[in-house]
Image (cartoon, grey):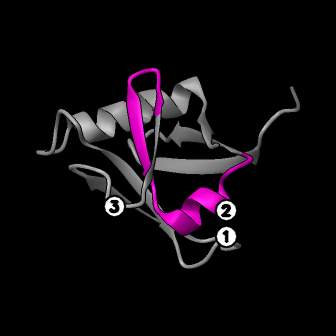
Amino acid sequence: MLTLTDTASTVVKEIVSGAEQVGTGGLRIDAAGPGSTEFAVAIAEHPESGDAVVEQNGARVFLGTDASVALADKTLDARVDQEGRVAFDIRQQAAA
């Protein structure tokens, strides 16, 4: 299952709390196919039917079916530049 770094958790919480959708809202990630390397990201009020829900450090991420498969062994990280723009990075999870 997708994991989030502490930075990604903080950024996701800030993005979602800055939107009108609050409470059960989260960041939704979807993909065109299970092997896809391109993802669509949007703020969502709630998960769609069939979405996997990742909750970590108070952040909620909803994964569409294909994104869930593509990101099963990945870690989501985030960085914010000096202008406040957010970029997400997807990395292989560290071996346990």
Q: Nearer the viewer, mark 1 or mark 2?
A: 2
Please give the residue where the numbered disc 3 appears in the rendered image: 49
Q: Residue at x 25, y 42 (%)?
A: 25
Please give the residue where the numbered disc 2 appears in the rendered image: 70
Circle 2 SS class: helix
Rendered location of residue 60, percent (x, y): 39, 37
Given residues 90 and 30, the one toward you in this image is 30
**Local crowd at mark 1 within 10 Å, few (<14), some, or many (≥20)?**
few
Give the distance between the C-alpha atoms of the residues marked 2 and 3, in whole angstroms.
18 Å
Find out whether the residues at labels 2 and 3 contact each other: C-beta distance under 8 Å: no
In the picture, measured across the screen, residue 86 lies left or right of residue 27, that is right
Given residues 87 and 47, the one toward you in this image is 47
Q: Earlier in the sequence, mark 1 or mark 2?
A: 1
Rendered location of residue 54, percent (x, y): 48, 38
Give the extent of the magenta segment. 55-73
Please tell me whether residue 27 is drawn above or below residue 78 in the rendered image: below
